[in-house]
Amino acid sequence: MQHLWTPWRSTYMKAAKDSSRECVFCAAAEQENDVESLIAYRAGHSFIILNRYPYTSGHIMIAPYAHVSRLNDAPAETIAEIAELTRTAEIVLERAYKPDGINLGMNLGRAAGAGIAEHIHMHMLPRWNGDANFMTSVADTRIIPESLDETYEKIRQGFEQLRVGT
């Protein structure tokens, strides 16, 4: 059996376990400054937000405005919109990053790996053949080749271009 160690996420995971903290998705959605909250696109029932602790450049999440911890607790129109945003995000990520593939996933509950189990969210990450490098493997360090500001602009512009049909 192989193990994948992700020690760079320990600070994030410890903070996520603090139940007295406000939900990061609800707090971001309530902010008016989308650049500060890293919300790249807002739809009617859900939104696209960058992961502040990305595994790779382009790591986005799709979250509903509703604070629900299970898919079955979300209204059907919200789930349909998340699915549609996932399809659109695939196009945005492919245009912006030209990846060899895309990881897509949702962890329901802490035992399933959810860092924020109280609010469902879909992860999408562009991936490339051979993108695991020695820094992650031997130095416990993740290399992210662009700033969150650069990622934000790529994703925001990608959704804007698709929204206006270009």
Image: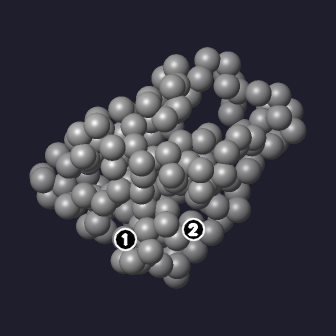
Which element carries disc 2, helix, strand or loop?
A: loop
Tell me the amino acid under the disc marked 1.
Ala
Tell me: residue 143, above or below residue 76: above
Task: Identify the residue shown where x is 25% and y is 58%.
Answer: 43
Q: In which quarter of the image is residue 17?
A: bottom right
Q: Mark 1 points at which residue?
A: 29
Q: Which of marks 2 and 1 is nearer the N terminus?
A: 2
Percent coordinates x, y for residue 118 in the rendering: 40, 65
Task: Identify the residue shown where x is 23% and y is 40%.
Answer: 165
Q: In which quarter of the image is residue 91?
A: top left
Quadrant into which the C terminus falls: top left
Percent coordinates x, y for residue 98 in the rendering: 51, 25
Looking at this view, is 14 or 60 the one in front?
60
Tell me the amino acid under the disc marked 2.
Lys
Disc marking residue 17: 2
Q: Could you tell whether 144 is left or right of 48 in the image?
A: right
Q: In which quarter of the image is residue 162?
A: top left
Q: Could you tell whether 67 is left or right of 14 in the image?
A: left
Percent coordinates x, y for residue 35 in the rendering: 49, 66
Which element carries disc 1, helix, strand or loop?
A: helix
Tell me: residue 88, above or below residue 62: above
| Residue positioned most to the bottom | 20
